[in-house]
Image (cartoon, rainbow, N blue to C red):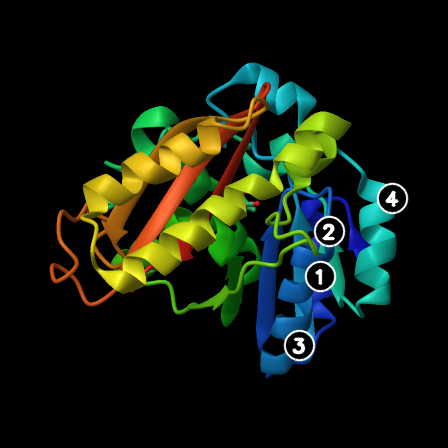
Amino acid sequence: MIICSSLSDLEQAISSLSNDCKIGLVPTMGALHQGHISLVKTAFKYTDTVIVSIFVNPVQFNNPDDLKRYPRTVEADCRLLEDAGTTIVFIPSVEDIYPEPDNRVFDLGGLDSVGEGPRRPGHFNGVAKVVTRLFDLTKPTYAFFGEKDFQQLAIIRFFTRQLGYPVEIIPCPIFREDDGLAMSSRNTLLDSEQRNAAPAIYKALSNASRLADQRELSPKELIGITVREINSNPYLNSEYVEIVNSLTLQPVTGWDEAAGIQMWVAVFAGEIRLIDNIKLK
Ligand code: PAF
């Protein structure tokens, strides 16, 4: 595995690859877990050249405390990536990614008007800045993103197409702990009570999915039940629960309104904010 800590390292590593190789890019913010490793494994099904970037992107954090406490475990990350057979790990500095202030404002097609968008102003524009920069630097044929960030995935697909990047976006399924909690770098920040409580989020989503199958409750009623179930746990506090059209991401009021329907949630466990989602249709 080649470790690149600067742009020139990366240029050199990429120039040493054969001209016809297809690069698979797995962008991450580090603090890697088996969910990330599953992205790397999926990437190797598409290509034998996999670049993983580790960069805690400051411009996608709307909350300075969240940025400050974001876990950083680069040495352990490199060990995991080496074991997974990663070709190149790219660990740029902020100056590498943003040599000049990046004032670009992206057209996100209104997909940021719901869910995380209004709750984290500027977040998805910040994601677009770093992802396009990583595309420019690594010129991937494929890029891999987890479905845990369902809205992020839709938005990345949108701007990749909109801006004409010849990159195929490959969605990868949510990787869960045995108790159902969606794997996330933020899980390491939970204290033991919060960690014990957190699987209740997926339990509530799974109940919602079962109830949705029966079609007896409206989406609005199902949201109410899910919020109450999550908030009945003293360590959890739901910030939002929404039921949306999986393509347009707009809220639905009936089950026949869209071919694909997703429920997504953001939940606070103390100060730690967790997100998850489930397909309802
Ligand atoms: O999902 C993430 O970890 C980040 O948002 C990403 C895509 C690596 C961009 O910083």
Asked if labels 1 and 2 touch by Cβ distance under 8 angstroms, the answer is yes
Q: Nearer the viewer, mark 3 or mark 2?
A: 2
Mark 3 or 4 closer to N-term? 3
Q: CA distance from mark 3 to mark 4?
A: 22 Å
The amino acid marked with disc number 3 is Phe
Q: Name the disc covering residue 37, or none.
A: 1
Asked if labels 4 and 3 touch by Cβ distance under 8 angstroms, the answer is no
Mark 4 or 2 closer to N-term? 2
Residue furthest toward the top? 65
Please indicate whether residue 81 sits to the left or right of residue 239 in the image: right
Mark 3 lies on residue: 44
The quadrant holding residue 41 is bottom right
Question: Is residue 116 in sight in this rendering?
Answer: no
Dot 1: within a 10 Å radius of its alpha carbon, few (fewer than 14), some, or many (20 or more) residues? Answer: some
Mark 2 lies on residue: 33
Mark 4 or 1 closer to N-term? 1
The amino acid marked with disc number 4 is Glu
